[in-house]
Image: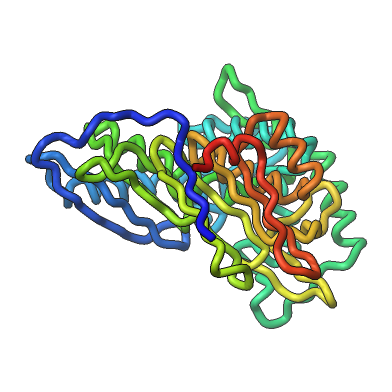
Amino acid sequence: MREVLVPLTVDAAMPPGGSTLFSTSGTSMGTTWSARMMLPPGFDGAVVSRALQNELDEIVAQMSHWAPDSVLSRYNHAPAGSWHALPPQFFAVAEYALQVSHDSGGAYDPAAGALVDLWGFGASGRHDQAGFHAPQAAAIDAVLARRSAARPVLDRAGRRLLQPGGAQLDLSSVAKGYAVDRMAHCLEDRSVRHFVVEAGGELRGAGVKAGGEPWWVQVEGVPDGDAARQTIVALHGLAIATSGDYRRYFQHGARRAAHTLDPRSGYPSDHGLASVTVLAPTCMAADALSTALTVLGPDAGLAFAEQRAIAARFLVRGAAGLTHITTRDWRLLMQ
């Protein structure tokens, strides 16, 4: 069975005459990135490729929790009461992430870095390293208490962020999506308007290929799912991101402790969700919302998505296999 999703509105503009298909790739944020584009005549692909890499390098310099000298790392280690002027990219991500946190009632929280570290999904003391043990309830409660007492404060007018003391940001569930958006803007700023860009499996597309064919991509499935059921989408003015329990996890007793943590309870999300995929105009939104919906679960998450006209697909594990649940806005795209 194949499902085909097509955007409701399509720009009929074609690539400039003489455009050629150009592909490039690289590494960033601990993963790979790639871009395919219809390059107009006279454009130097090597120059475009370097521009894309530079864009990604700047995201790492600002928002990496692995790099000790990143803006984010310096904020996490700053003294209580200090204000931090944010570069435009960092400000855009922090503002959006805090808004999703508010809208989701805390199911999504960019300040859950200490909790991520505690469960072995941070930059050190990882779950796949020798000597790691899943945290005890007392340690989880202590982290939750500290986080509750130390919430970052965003001064939107001044574009700065307060470190109240001990706040630990982790933007890994939104920065990669934002990086994909920055790649798209990088191309558009150079008058390259027909492309698909990707980082770590999250994608955004615009325009068409030669002959008017859209950029078709297959929606990420689940490794142990139904291989015969495929969904493809015309990535035309759309971005896509998936959050899944099969990417980073470890067995915690009889449970699968996945990297998507519920910041309200302090424990890995456990709703039986195998994955959540979101289609949105920006990859930053698709990235953050797929995580938020995973934490909310198939019932509350579906209600949240329906109320906000989010195109989302939930794959829920059960005794009989995977159940597919989609929102109205997802179904509207189906052809």
Query: Horizontally, is 175 left or right of 12 in the view?
Result: right
Residue 104 appears in the figure: yes
Query: Horizontally, is 190 left or right of 157 in the view?
Result: left
Whole-percent x, y for residue 219 in the image: 51, 55
Relative to residue 177, is residue 133 depicted above or below? below
- View extreme (right): residue: 138
Say which residue appears at 31% left-offset and 51% top-offset. Answer: 35
Residue 77 appears in the figure: no
Query: Horizontally, is 8 left or right of 184 in the view?
Result: right
Query: Horizontally, is 269 left or right of 40 in the view?
Result: right
Residue 138 quadrant: bottom right
Say which residue appears at 42% left-offset and 28% top-offset. Answer: 9
- View extreme (top): residue: 157
Viewer-side residue, 271 vs 209: 209
Say which residue appears at 69% left-offset and 61% top-offset. Answer: 274
Whole-percent x, y for residue 281 in the image: 49, 34
